[in-house]
Amino acid sequence: MEFWFTEKQTERFGITMKVKRTLHTEKTEYQQLDMVETEEFGNMLLLDGMVMTTEVDEFVYHEMVTHVPLFTHPKPKHVLVVGGGDGGAIREVIKHPSVEEATLVDIDGKVMEYSKKYLPTIARALDDERVDVQVDDGFMHIAQSEGAYDVIMVDSTEPVGPAAKLFEKGFYEGISKALKEDGIFVAQTDNPWFHQDLIRQVYKDVSDIFPITRLYTANIPTYPSGMWTFTIGSKTYDPLAVSNDRFHDIETKYYTKDLHSASFVLPKFVQDLVK
Ligand code: SAM
């Protein structure tokens, strides 16, 4: 008997993966949490039936959502990750020696708990002494922060349920307030095949608030369509104007200095979304 997990990415298209076994399944206070062992991509975290991260391809997303803004800022010291309970983004954040405090705010403590248990290579930084993990609503945390952070990454689930308000203009206005006067923010903004309206709307909202707004992409095999986007909003520093001496060596498997700028080169149909 073979078992396959299928994520329907639209009503007519999906991705399917052969599953060895289910490691944990639970309806938490906020979402359905499943941890499964797949044949191809190792252990995989699902939230509400959507692929969040896998042991095998997680590095792409976690390196790109963090190193693009962190190398753009000349000296990031105080960094916030909203969501990101699997720990992958914060693991990349603390690779930067300038970072003095990395705060992670995820609404669901169960995500941290089971990521530590079944995704140890992703979640290992959650216990690092420079990391402050808070179980809280990222929307409330941002509303209560002012001039606190150099860089903020929004590593949330899709714009449904508790994450819906993390894709609204009011939240981005709150982020701008929570950032220092030369701060930078990045949000994961889904894929340009099935979520064009979201990308258009977020890009418009962010560009109304931040003087420098850009979209960049990465290739993530287990995410819907395999092509992922990130929207970056910056008060001062342009991600395409980073001096060579900024790029100090860190261990990566996807991100490189050249890919930093190349990721902003967009296919025509994606350019048209953000014109
Ligand atoms: N990289 C994944 C993606 O791009 O879809 C996201 C992974 S991460 C596990 C998503 C996290 O967002 C979840 O742990 C979820 O609990 C968290 N989340 C959703 N809404 C939130 C909110 N309002 N405040 C804080 N965290 C939230």
Image (cartoon, helix red, strand yellow):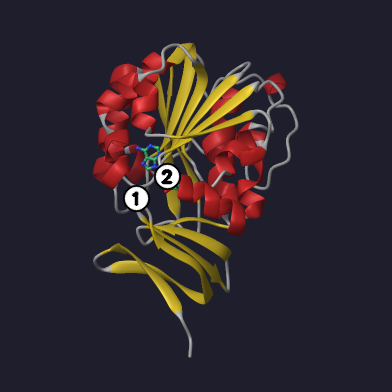
Dividing the picture into quadrants, the one containing residue 68 is top right
Q: Judge left or right: residue 129 versus residue 144.
A: right
- Residue under the point 66% across and 28% down: 130
Label 1 belongs to which residue? 29
Q: Secondary structure at mark 2?
A: loop
Label 2 belongs to which residue? 108
Which residue is nearer to you in this view: 9 or 51? Answer: 51
- Residue under the point 26% across and 68% down: 12
- Residue under the point 58% across and 37% down: 90
The residue lying furthest to the right in this view is 249
The residue lying furthest to the bottom in this view is 1
Circle 1: residue type? Glu
Dividing the picture into quadrants, the one containing residue 20 is bottom right
N-terminal-most mark, 1 or 2: 1
x, y percentage for residue 7? 37, 66
x, y percentage for residue 166? 32, 34
Question: Does the numbered disc 2 mark a residue whose Cβ is under 8 Å from ligand 1?
Answer: yes
Q: Is residue 14 visible?
A: yes
